[in-house]
Amino acid sequence: MNKRIGIIGGGAAGLYAACQLKRLSQSPIEVTVIEKNSEPGKKLTLTGHGRCNITNRKDISLLKEGYHEAEKFLYPALKEFGPDDTVSFFENEAGLKTKEEDNNRIFPVCDSAVKVRDALVSFISDSTKIICGAEVKNIKKTEGFEVATSKGDFIFDYLILSCGGSSFPKTGSTGDSYRFAKALGHDVIPVRGALAPIRADEASIGFCRNLSGVTVRAGVSLYCEGKKTAYKEGELLFAEFGLTGPAVMEISREVPEDIAGRDVYLELDLVPQMTDEAFDKELLRLIGGHGDTKISTLLSGFVPQSVAAEITTKAGSEGSYAQSFTKENRRSICREMKHLKIGLASAPDIKTAYVTRGGVPLKEVDRKTMESKIVKDLYITGEALDIDGISGGYNLQACMSEAYLAAKSILNQ
Ligand SMILES: Cc1cc2nc3c(=O)[nH]c(=O)nc-3n(C[C@H](O)[C@H](O)[C@H](O)COP(=O)(O)OP(=O)(O)OC[C@H]3O[C@@H](n4cnc5c(N)ncnc54)[C@H](O)[C@@H]3O)c2cc1C
């Protein structure tokens, strides 16, 4: 009898699993993807600002560090099917040319996430039945897996649970993976947002709003109750609501859930390439040589003009010229340039987070196959697992690598 394989969720992880099953199978199999939306891969079509950052071509020894606590768990998957394999799959099998951009990020040449989704769907069109508009309501393990959906009931011999996390729920990922995993006997680590924008509190919102749309390179430190708990350096973007951009989004996973009444804030270093002392020395040198220049003009050698103007105002030196600058004025400027405090209005909101932290504990899943250690023939991939990678193509690569291991293991049985 053909192996009947059910894939719950037609997102990135589910579509990748169907692709890997097609690539690797040498005997007849029946693959069915069950997707509750009217089309598969809704979130996938939004990725990379509509361009889809497919993967990241860093060496695996570096790449794995982008998965935080899941680094060790994911290593075998990345080793067996890594970024080079993903690129080769898209180029040589799915018919989609790719290109490499800064920081080893891989995008399709067409710059279209919709076309990435379409290429995957087209690749599996002759091997896989995709049933859309079918919401899985319940999964029961008997001889096989009994799957009850809004479009009827199904029985599968193997099941790949890939219905996502809880982030960006408007794309369909509303935490159902966790409900099904729990019902099947798994534990679930409480979920929260990762790679999320940060809303500034009342004291800081005006500063951010005035600079909305401006990007800077900065060091971003997270402080909780006076202790520095995380640091990231990279680009950040000021926004109407506060801060976003890679450095801020990557630090968001470390913001405690309950920040009400607690002293939790971000500290921005707008000149991360210099120590406080070196920056002060450089400022002193510039002041000495440009007495008739406005301070904000001198600062625009370090940050965009608009940021320099806001910083000067915040430091109480609006309109000041270098020649009148006192040591105290310089100290204020150094404080705002190197230790700019941005208060947080709330913990990151999972609704606007790009990925979910938490989910099915990795200790309950075999890292060499993605098979559940609790339920035989159940495989768990994608955001359903307690894995969140940094930005830059890491999260989709994790889905692809996991899909490979799951497909290989199912087909080897
Ligand atoms: C705006 C945005 C941009 C991103 N950009 C990138 C990027 O460029 N590169 C990158 O690597 N990562 C990116 N990510 C992260 C990446 O999209 C996710 O990590 C990835 O989509 C997770 O795949 P998944 O299949 O586990 O979940 P999803 O893609 O969320 O898919 C889960 C699917 O399951 C379906 N489903 C849920 N419940 C049920 C049910 N009960 N019955 C049937 N179907 C169900 C959902 O409708 C959904 O289609 C981005 C995320 C967001 C939100």
Image (cartoon, grey):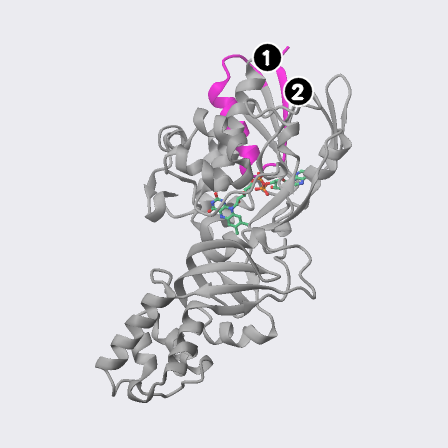
Question: Which residue shows up at 55% across the image and 35% down it?
Answer: 13
Residue closest to the eye, 225 or 159: 225
Helix, strand or loop at mark 1 = loop
Check the image and report above or below for 127 versus 385: above
- Residues tagged 1 and 2 counted as in contact (Cβ below 8 A): yes
Q: Which residue lies furthest to the left in this view?
A: 289
- Is residue 121 visible to us here? no
Q: Position of residue 288 (x, y in %)?
A: 24, 81
Verify whether residue 28 appears in magenta. yes
Rendering quadrant holding ligand 1 = top right
Residue closest to the eye, 368 or 395: 368
Q: Position of residue 290 (x, y in %)?
A: 23, 82
Q: Cβ(mark 2) to ligand 1 < 8 Å? A: no
Question: Which residue shows up at 36% across the image and 85% down it?
Answer: 326
Q: What residue type is labelled 2?
A: Asp
Question: Which residue shows up at 43% across the image and 41% down it?
Answer: 54
Q: Position of residue 214 (x, y in %)?
A: 41, 68
Q: Position of residue 125 (x, y in %)?
A: 51, 29
Query: Disc 2 designates what residue?
Result: 377
* Direction from residue 210 to residue 179 in the image, left or right: right
* Direction from residue 198 to residue 177 in the image, left or right: right
Query: Disc 1 designates what residue?
Result: 413
Crowding around mark 1 (Cα neighbors within 10 Å: few <14, some 14 to 19, many 20+) is few
Check the image and report above or below for 362 versus 104: above
On residue 77, which mark appears? none
Q: What residue type is labelled 1?
A: Gln
Over which residues does the magenta segment extend?
Answer: 1-29
Whichever of labels 1 and 2 marks the residue nearer the N terminus, that label is 2
Check the image and report above or below for 11 versus 7: below
Helix, strand or loop at mark 2 = loop
Question: Which residue shows up at 61% across the image and 13% down it?
Answer: 2
Q: Cβ(mark 1) to ligand 1 < 8 Å? A: no
